[in-house]
Image (tube, rainbow, N blue to C red):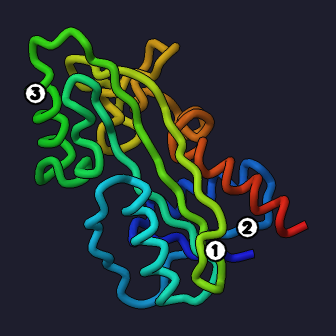
Amino acid sequence: MKIVLASSNKHKVQEINDIVKSLGLDIEFILPPGDFDPVEDGKNFEENSYIKAYEAWKLSKTWVLADDSGLCIDALGGKPGIYSARYAETPALRIERVLKELDGINNRDAHFTCSMTLMNPQGEVEHKYQGICEGSIITEARGINGFGYDPIFLVKGDTRTMAELSEEEKNQISHRSVALRHILEYLQKITK
């Protein structure tokens, strides 16, 4: 079964296909056809996930999976939230901004959120789910794996940042993995 992943990010497609492969499922995620560049103007992760799913469905008219995800920091009122990818011009500057905004703040609790929307070939929302990975923000970047805010995100119950985990370890606990596994379980039930 092929499912369009509502993204232009090849790394995300690879990450999701790696998780699917590790579970031994006969599902392959592919990029949308044509020019995929939706305007993400939703008020939360769920709305943005739906916007992306619908735009990818209009291009493909088949099964589509979309996600919207980001980092939410308690002391910053949930910021950067849906603006995680646009919080500054580069990943390094985004990390720098977060660390500067948290300077002197003791409560550094945070979580990554991933909201997924599965759309069927008729353009209807078939299923949706939100995955969360709890942790906190450390004071300086550590690790070379992953991307985005991974180097400053200390995974709850671990002494390592997300960027210090191997790809396999991250794919066991990440917010995207949690949401994806739920969606895949749902797909397995309805396609048997």
Q: Earlier in the sequence, mark 2 or mark 3?
A: 2
Tell me which amino acid carries mark 2.
Ile
Residue 34 location in percent, x, y?
41, 90
Q: Residue at x 57, y 76 (%)?
A: 4
Tell me which amino acid carries mark 3.
Glu
Q: Residue at x 37, y 81 (%)?
A: 36
Instruction: Count residues near mark 2 (Cα–Cα under 10 Å), then give few for <14, some for 14-19, many for 20+.
Output: some
User: From the viewer's perspective, is residue 48 above or below residue 81?
Assistant: below
Give the secondary structure at mark 2.
Answer: loop
The quadrant of the image that shows the N terminus is bottom right
* Cα gap from disc 2 to disc 3, whole angstroms: 42 Å
User: From the viewer's perspective, is residue 166 above or below residue 89?
Assistant: above
User: Is there CB contact under 8 Å for labels 2 and 1?
Assistant: yes
User: From the viewer's perspective, is residue 2 above or below residue 91?
Assistant: below
Q: Residue at x 11, y 53 (%)?
A: 89
> Which residue, as the protein is rendered here, is positioned at the far right?
192
Residue holding disc 1 = 3
Disc ID at residue 101:
3
Give the secondary structure at mark 1.
Answer: strand
Residue 180 location in percent, x, y?
61, 51
Q: Is residue 118 left or right of residue 1?
A: left
Q: Quadrant of residue 152?
A: top left
**Nearest the camera: 28 or 54?**
54
Q: Earlier in the sequence, mark 3 or mark 1?
A: 1
Tell me which amino acid carries mark 1.
Ile
Q: Earlier in the sequence, mark 2 or mark 1?
A: 1
User: Is there CB contact under 8 Å for labels 2 and 3?
Assistant: no
Q: Nearer the viewer, mark 2 or mark 3?
A: 3
Q: Is residue 32 left or right of residue 78?
A: right
Residue holding disc 2 = 27
Give the secondary structure at mark 3.
Answer: helix
Residue 5 location in percent, x, y?
53, 70
